[in-house]
């Protein structure tokens, strides 16, 4: 029978001090990043690009689709039917539409850049078919 090893008190104290130090460091870094506004910089740039169009998004705007976007977000900004991308891209993920394009590609062993391009083409194709009708 094996004996239980007791954890020494100095080890526990060092561990707690390390955890407190890391927590303080993480909070400080988060505040620094927030002050520099690095978290939202890319999303704000995208919003600015979309805002410059001053009209509804269409086929020419499909290039704005990026890996950080969820399928639901793409559906919303392009006013696509909720199941359009799911059907067109043959998405079987149970998290659809709340999964990002990049995460879906990564978890399904797909090339992320190629999958983003496929999503862009699907968006453009939607407008090509709806305007042709």
Image (cartoon, helix red, strand yellow):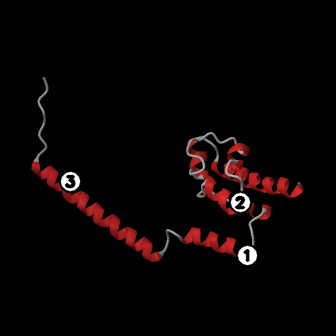
**Residue picked out by circle 1:** 54
Furthest residue to the right? Answer: 132
Would residue 131 be found to the left or right of residue 116 on screen?
A: right
Q: Quadrant of residue 107?
A: top right
N-terminal-most mark, 3 or 2:
3
In front here: 7 or 99?
Answer: 99
Q: How many marks?
A: 3
Q: Is residue 118 above or below residue 68?
A: above
Which quadrant is the C terminus positioned in? Answer: bottom right
Q: Residue at x 63, y 43 (%)?
A: 110
N-terminal-most mark, 1 or 2:
1
Q: Residue at x 67, y 63 (%)?
A: 77
Looking at the image, is mark 1 or mark 3 nearer the viewer? 1
N-terminal-most mark, 1 or 3:
3
Task: For label 2, count other residues whose C-alpha is less than 10 Å away and answer few (under 14), some (14-19) or many (20+).
Answer: few
In front here: 22 or 119?
Answer: 119
Dot 1: element: loop
- Whether the residues at callouts 1 and 2 have beta carbons within 8 Å, the answer is no
Task: For label 3, count other residues whose C-alpha is less than 10 Å away and answer few (under 14), some (14-19) or many (20+).
Answer: few
**Residue picked out by circle 3:** 15
**Residue picked out by circle 2:** 79
Which quadrant is the N terminus positioned in? Answer: top left
Residue 109: x, y in percent?
60, 41
């Amino acid at each position: 029978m094996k004996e239980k090893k007791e954890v020494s008190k100095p080890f526990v104290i060092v561990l707690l001090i390390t955890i407190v130090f890391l927590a303080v460091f993480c909070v400080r870094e988060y505040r620094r990043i927030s002050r520099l506004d690095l978290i939202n910089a890319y999303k704000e740039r995208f919003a600015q690009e979309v805002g410059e169009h001053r009209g509804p998004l269409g086929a020419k705007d499909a290039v704005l689709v990026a890996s950080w976007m969820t399928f639901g977000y793409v559906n919303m900004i392009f006013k696509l039917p909720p199941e359009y991308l799911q059907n067109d891209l043959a998405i079987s993920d149970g998290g659809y539409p709340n999964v990002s394009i990049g995460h879906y590609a990564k978890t399904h062993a797909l090339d992320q850049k190629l999958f983003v391009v496929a999503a862009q083409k699907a968006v453009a194709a939607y407008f090509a078919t709806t305007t042709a009708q």
